[in-house]
Structures are given as C-alpha cells and as structure tokens.
Image (cartoon, grey):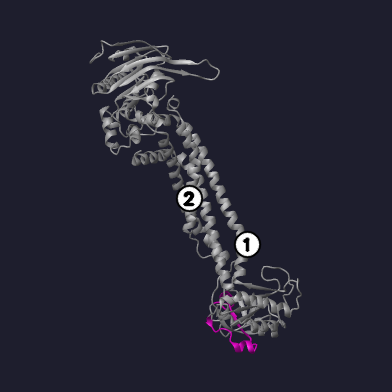
Amino acid sequence: MIELKEVAKTYRKANEPPVKAIDRVSLKIEPGELVAILGPSGSGKSTLMNVIGLLDRPDSGEYTLNGQAVQALNDDELAGLRNRVLGFVFQSYHLLPRTTSLENVQLPLLYANRKDYKERSAAALAAVGLSDRMNHFAEELSGGQQQRTAIARAIVNEPSVLLADEPTGNLDSVASAEIVELLKTLNAKGTTVVLITHDHEVAKEANRIIRIRDGAIESDEPNVRGAGGVE
Amino acid sequence: MSPSLLFHTIWTRLWRYKAKTLFMGLGIMIAALTTVVLLTIIGSVRARFLVFIGHAFPSNSITVMAGGGPMSPGTAGRKNLRLADVETVVGSSGATEWDPLLIAGLRDVKRSGNALRVGVGGYSDKAESVRGQSVQEGEFLSADDVRDRAHVALIGATTAEKLFPGESPIGAELFIDNVPFHVKGVLEAAGVDVHGNDQDNTIRVPYTTLMDHMLKVSYVSGVTLLFDDQSRIEAASQEVTRILRERHQIGAGQKDDFTVITAVIMHEMFERAFRTFTIFIPLIAATAFLISALVIMSIMQISIKGRTQEIGLRKALGARSRDLQIQILLEVLIVAVLASAAGILLAQIGIKTVAVPLLKAKMGVEQGNPSLMVLAIALGASLGTGLLGGFLPARRAAKLKPVEALK
C-alpha cells in the first residue's frame, strides 16, 4: 500500500543552516492497517505526513503508493492520486467558511467529476452522524462536529488511505474519543488509517506505533493494546 | 470537473460574498453603461444627420450656393449669383427641375394683435417637388404666383399656431415688414433640424415677389437642380462650375465665389466632421474597460491572497492547477457577464428616459435603441476585461503549493 525507501527531505532557507526534516526514512504500511506515527513537535512527523500525502516531494528516496512509483508522476497525476486514493484530516479541520457541511463534503467530488455528488456527500455525512447538520455553515458547528464533517469530506471519495494529522489536537477529551472511535470504525471497514500524533493516549488506540525523533524512525512495533489484528 | 457542482460552487461563493462580487462588477457595469450610452447616442445622432442631409441634399440633386457655402463664414460672393446665371446653368446642365432659394432672414411679421420675428425665404412653385415638402392645409405656390409676383405666403405649422391660434389661417392677411400677404397654405410639419432650430417657424413667398417688391435685388442665395439620372451628377456639377466661373470671370488659380454641393460631397464633409467622435468615443470606452480590468485584477489578487488556505485545501483534495484557473476565471467571467448585463439594462433606461427626450428636443433624434453591434461590443469588452483582470490572479492561485498554502 505505502512503501518508503530511504526517503529524505531537507528544508533550506536563506541565511539559515539547512534542516534535515526527515533523513532516509524507510517504512511499509499494508492495506487495512491502523498505524500511529508518534513524535514530539519538530520530530519531522508533519514532513513525513506531507510526503506520504503527496503534498510535498521528497529530495531523495523512493515512494511507492498503491504500486505506483510516485517520484515519476507529474503534479496533475499527484493531484489525481490525492483525490482518489488519499483522504486528509487536519488538526484545524480546514473547512471553508460561509460554506455548508454538505458543500464542504462535496469539495473532493468536484475534482472527481462525479454525477452522484449529492447522494455521496449526504451518505458520507450520515456515516459520521451529521445528517441533521447538512445545511449548517461550518462555523456554526462545534469543534467535534467540524472534525466529523472533515472526516466525511475525507471519506466521500472512498479513498484507500486516510491520513489524519493531529485530528484531536484542537478537541476536548469527549470529542477526541468520538473522533478516534470514528477512525477505528472506518479502519474496521477496510480503510487504511495513518494517524500522526504527539499524544500517547491517541497513539495507543492504533495497532502499530511508529516512533519518530529528529527525522528518523526510533522504533516501529505492534501495539498489543490495540484492538483488531496485529502483525 | 463536474460542471453542475462547479457552477453551484461559483454561484454560492459569489452570492455569499456579495460585497466583493459587487465591487468586482461595478467597474464593468459602469464601463458597459458608458459604452452603450455613448455609442447609441452617437449612432442615433449620426442617423439623424444622415436623414437630414439626405433630405436637404438628395442624391439626384446639385445645390449651388452663392458665396463660400453653408460651412464657410464671410459674405464674399453672396450677392453674385444672378438669376441669369441660374437660368444659364439650368439650360446647359440638363436639369429636369430646379428651385431657386432666396434667404431674406428674420423679418417682422404682424397679424392684427400678434407680432413675431420669422425667417422668410423666397421659393418657386417647384419647391414642392424639388424639396419634397408639401402643404398640410390650403394650396402650394403656383407658377402664376411666381410669374405675377403675387403677395401670397406659405407658413409653417408653428408660425400658424402663433399667429392664428385656434383658427384656420387660409386666406387671412398678414404683414411682412408692413407689406401685406395672403396666407395660401400651411406647410407640412418638419420638426426641429439637427441644430435644434424649429423648421416649422418659417414663411415662404414667391422668390420673384421677394426679389422685386421687397428686397429689390437681382440675385438669389442658391438653387437646387434635380436630375433624372444620378450618374449625370458628377459631370453636371463640373459643368455648372465651369459655366459659373466663366460667367463670373474667375481666372485660373482664383477661388470660386459660389459653392457646388452634391450628396457625395456632403457625405464626405459630414463623415470628416464626425470622425472625431468615431475615434474618441471608442477610446473613452476602452479606457473605462481598462480601468475596470485593473480594478478586477487588484480585487482578485487581494481575494486570492485571502483565499490561500482554500486554494491549498482544494489542491490537497485533488484540484489540478488547471481546475483552479478555470474556477477563478469562471468566477470573474460570470461577474463580467452579469455586470455588463446590468450596465446594458441601465443604459437602456438612461437612453429612453433622459438621452432620447433631450436629443429629440435639441436635434430631432427620434429613436435610441442600441444596435446589436453596440450590445455585442459592450458584452465582448466586458468578457475581455474579465479575462484580462482574472488571468494573473488565476495563474497565481494555480501556482500555489498545497503544503505552503495549508500552513
């Protein structure tokens, strides 16, 4: 599903020494896994998420997604993969203001050119339990509802991989638990979930925890407490 | 991209950000309004002038004016066109009909209690056919009237209304500079001319009466010759010039003391005078559109800057650069179309309620419907403005990197 080989990314700014955000990272994630990438801020986990999510290109190394060598693809092809194969959940939700939940969920469908976008977006909102909030503007929803809307948007195009970057970072404990539960449900239905977090409690819900520090993988082991299959 | 979802997206955005949409459209609306109003008025005025010229100088006629002609000031040669000259010219040019004209200027006209100053002119019985204006009441001048130097007059509708309110003027007596005349007919109404003068405030008497009994002169102000064959006009006008130069003993290199006007010459003169408008009006319109393109561009640039996150998100969710360019350009184009439609509508209202009534009173302009051409120009310029103003912002949006835009 996801395979990184010796992937590195260095950020260069004028008048500053270059920063190695990730340094020769190799990892493999199989279909159906629920993986947590755990690390403190500045550890390079966000860069790793951007590379896995095709939002940023690595400087070196190989990345294979769904059997496709990503470094050979152009920007439009990457956009197509982001649209069809990947779903994103962000810490700050990234919902469009003055835009209803339903319209926010329909965003990926615009670029997927789906005729059944109304049915699909309504079904995705139903799957996260927000059918009664379809026509509310994003800013009228609570934090937990906004993140559920964002998850509905992430799954509306039925991606194989869900990338969640600190999805509970802005939420209280009750809402956090709901979101984690929702991600586990989606994983149980077959979606690969990659959870990027600095929160050990959230990471414990995963089946496998990859610890990252200073741009390199520190440890990568199954999580015995996690529910479901362990490698 | 899904077309219906794209239009829904653009439409709801424009609607929910009304103030921005309005600002973007305002410039185009004003530019379209200005263009349609100016071009329509120019078109109507031009059409009115052409009708006026066509009426005054029919294409099968030659008009000879004493002196430098209507466009030239000064009095040189004004008294040099003798009746004998006119008769010779008529005889050798092959004209089928002719009508002299003697302008007597404003004269005191009295009728019992009422007194007026009215422009008086001398014509022949042929004026009816040569100048295409008959009487609406009474009878026209006859050949006998001209031969006998009869004291009869045709009066314009306005003059009739002023001197004989509420009664028929036919057969009544009036005095021109204290000389008595009988009213023989009331001329058909002609409205205002292109200079705003009321053509119906006029009195026409036999030119012979005017020459011999009132002004005591042997010259006329001009003559209009009619021809059967339009192709003869060019040669005939040269012949007229040759004869008059010979009779007036004008040597080679000296200027004519008369002016020969044909429809072709008149049209050339008119188009030359009108060219200023046809160059400057499009220039003004183009400037207006250029300014609104700059306004759109700056508003869109600011808007794109404020929408960095949205654009980054759209890219993350699968939008290609081209998709974003299309979306932004369509937004601008839809605003441009709506704004130009509003501008055209306002222009129509403005033309109908303000411009046409004003122009009708000032120069007799009858209609002011913008031509399809004018509407197409306004719409085309609006779309061009939108494209021009939206192009750079759209490119800028498309170039944003998702990872930077999402920060």
Q: Quadrant of the N terminus of chain B?
A: top left
- Which chain hosts label 1? B
- Which chain hosts label 2? B
Specify which label sits upstream in the sequence, 1 or 2.
1
Q: Position of residue B180 (x, y in %)?
A: 65, 85
Q: For residue B73, which quarter of the picture?
A: bottom right
The residue located at (48%, 40%) in the rendering is B390
What is the tally of numbered marks visible in this picture?
2
Q: Is residue A14 left or right of residue B79?
A: left
Mark 1 and mark 2: Cα distance apart in space: 28 Å
The residue located at (42%, 27%) in the rendering is B402
Q: Identify the residue position indicated by label 1 in the image.
A: B273
**Relative to A150, residue B209 above or below:** below
Amino acid under disc 1? Ala
Give the magenta-colored segment's residue range: B136-165
- Viewer-proximal residue among B49 and B214: B49
Amino acid under disc 2? Gly
